[in-house]
Amino acid sequence: MNRLANKKIVITGASSGIGEKVAFKVAELGARPILLARSKDKLKAISDKINKDANINSTYYPLDVGDFAEVNVVFKRITEEIGQVDILLNNAGFGIFDSFHEASLGDIERMFHVNVLGMMACTKAVLPSMINENGGHIINVASQAGKLATPKSSGYAATKHAVLGFTNTLRLELSDTNIFVSSVNPGPIETSFFDIADKSGNYVKNVKRYLLKPDHVAEQIVRLMQNPKRELNLPRWMNTGSVLYNLLPSISDKVVGRFLNKK
């Protein structure tokens, strides 16, 4: 049974990477992707291609999720023009890798504004209608960095810890409803994310053999939409490391600390 047919799926950060790939994949299954990102030109090109290839009425709205007033305006338009959102994929985000003593507080503030507060703003915009209809699915893209500390990513890791804390709390608050709340916790993915996060290229070089393929991650997210669960952890072996780290943090710091220092 195709559980995504005719579903209205809002995807933030849809102009490239995982967001773009998920948009194409859900359209193939008969869902209607609603694309959000800052670049109007990229969104238009993706939406046009989806409509041509899948014969689906995809649409798009330029949006900076860090602009909360704009978030409210755009989601109000979506509700008025399209109707209730069935699935929200909070995918927008970015990272910058620096040792904390060298990091810019301005960069850290921008990461929190987009990765955490922007995600919260989009969630808050869809939640009233989901509660009213007693249904829906909110998927927040976090990271294994939200579970496992690594050097030179204090600001980024802190945002992803916050995403997981928010996601887990929201799930408990909605436990008596039919609204699903999921987190996606991937390891490093072969996307343009590192054009900003890792300008030296050292991290990508050091973890090249561990990089996840974006098509695989997108496929797993689409499966999560079809069969909701608490968490999606990719790859599984990396999440095992995160679990062990949380169980034995002191030992893990000593034993695997050097292994984690790849940035």
Image (cartoon, grey):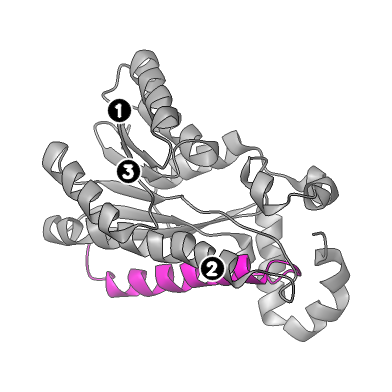
Residue type indicated by callout 2? Thr
Question: Hey, what amino acid is under mark 1?
Answer: Ser
Q: Magenta residues, as a range? A: 148-177
Mark 3 falls on what kind of element? strand
* Circle 3: residue type: Val
Identify the residue under disc 2. 159
Q: According to the image, label 3 marks what residue?
A: 10
Q: Quadrant of the N terminus?
A: top left
Q: CA distance from mark 2 to mark 1?
A: 31 Å
Q: On the image, numbered disc 1 is attached to which residue?
A: 58
Callout 1–callout 3 Cβ contact below 8 Å? no
| Residue in front for this viewpoint, 190 or 237 | 190
Left or right of 6, for residue 198: right
Mark 2 lies on a secondary structure that is helix
Q: Residue furthest top?
A: 52
Q: CA distance from mark 2 to mark 3?
A: 22 Å
* Disc 2 + disc 1, Cβ < 8 Å: no
Give the class, few, some or many, for how many residues have Cα within 10 Å of label 3's Cα (few <14, many ≥20).
Answer: many
